Image: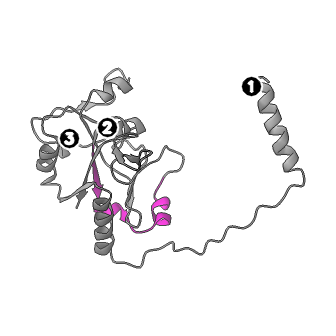
């Protein structure tokens, strides 16, 4: 059977199964949609979750951020999205910009040769310890946060919420979304934790505010 015939068969079976046009059941929406915690408690919850997921968490201000980035990045070659402010970056570090003067972006091989990436973030959910990147100019395309081995993610405190519904309200669902809960990790067949399989092996989160 050819691929075209197989596709036609599958679609025909789906059509047959839906021939009586069943009505979709109404989905209950009785879960919490608004946090009742104060913001300091929400931020503390996020920090606790991220630490539990083996991310390194730091609290900085706009004045201390460049010094922290210098400490975290060291001598690593670093890529940043075009929208990351120059004021974030320490003096003496000349990062690689993802988009060059001709408008082309770095290849996966070129990204893999770089040591680290610095991005911003759109919103973070404290309940699940999840950081959302929404492909904004200061976050870049998905490959930037997935290929380099070390990701430094800046999370402004005013973007931290408690609940997933609150986070989803701040997301542009028309653009690619990357959700990060700690460094990339999985378990092999013997349940041994392996890091860096599907993304960065090291995640540093800077809570900015």
- Image coords of residue 155 (percent x, y): 29, 55
Residue at image position (29%, 37%) is 149
Distance from label 3 to label 1 (Cα)?
Answer: 51 Å
Please report whichever mark, 2 or 1, sits nearer to the chain's N-terminal start: 1
Report if residue 130 lies within the magenta region: no
In-front residue for pair 51/86: 51
Q: As drawn, is 92 to the left or to the right of 88?
A: left
Q: Is residue 199 visible?
A: yes
Q: Which region of the structure is painted magenta?
A: 151-171
Q: Which residue is the site of mark 1?
A: 3
Task: Say which element carries label 3.
Answer: helix
Q: Is residue 105 visible?
A: no
Q: Position of residue 27 (x, y in %)?
A: 68, 67
- Residue at horizontal 37%, vertical 40%? 199
C-alpha span from label 2 to label 3: 11 Å
> In which quadrant of the rendered view does residue 140 lie?
top left
Which callout, 3 or 1, points at the residue further toward the start of the chain?
1
Is 180 on the left-hand or right-hand side of 55?
Answer: right
Please name the residue that numbered disc 2 is placed on: 81
Q: Nearer the viewer, mark 3 or mark 1?
A: 1
The quadrant in which the N terminus is found is top right
Q: Quadrant of the C terminus?
A: bottom left
**Element on which disc 1 rests:** helix
Secondary structure of the residue carrying tag 2 is loop
Question: Badge 1, how many Cα within 10 Å: few under 14, some, many 20+?
Answer: few
Residue shown at 81%/27% (left/top)? Answer: 5
Q: Which mark is residue 152?
A: none
Q: Nearer the viewer, mark 2 or mark 1?
A: 1
2 or 3: mark nearer the eye: 2
């Amino acid at each position: 059977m050819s691929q075209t015939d197989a596709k036609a068969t599958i679609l025909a079976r789906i059509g047959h199964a839906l021939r009586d046009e069943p009505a979709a059941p109404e989905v209950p929406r009785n879960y919490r949609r608004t946090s009742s915690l104060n913001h300091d408690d929400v931020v503390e919850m996020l920090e606790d979750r991220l630490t539990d997921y083996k991310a390194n968490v730091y609290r900085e201000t706009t004045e201390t951020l460049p010094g922290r980035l210098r400490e975290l990045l060291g001598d690593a070659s670093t890529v940043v999205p075009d929208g990351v402010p120059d004021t974030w970056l320490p003096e003496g570090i000349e990062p690689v910009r993802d988009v060059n003067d001709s408008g082309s972006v770095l290849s996966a091989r070129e990204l893999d040769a770089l040591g680290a990436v610095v991005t911003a973030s759109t919103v973070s959910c404290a309940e699940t310890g999840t950081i959302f990147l929404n492909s904004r100019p200061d976050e870049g395309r998905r490959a930037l946060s997935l290929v380099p081995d070390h990701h430094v993610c800046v999370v402004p405190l005013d973007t931290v919420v408690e609940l997933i519904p609150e986070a989803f309200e701040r997301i542009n669902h028309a653009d690619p979304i990357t959700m990060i809960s700690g460094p990339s990790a999985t378990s092999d067949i013997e349940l041994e934790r392996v890091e860096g399989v599907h993304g960065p092996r090291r995640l540093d989160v800077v809570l900015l505010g």
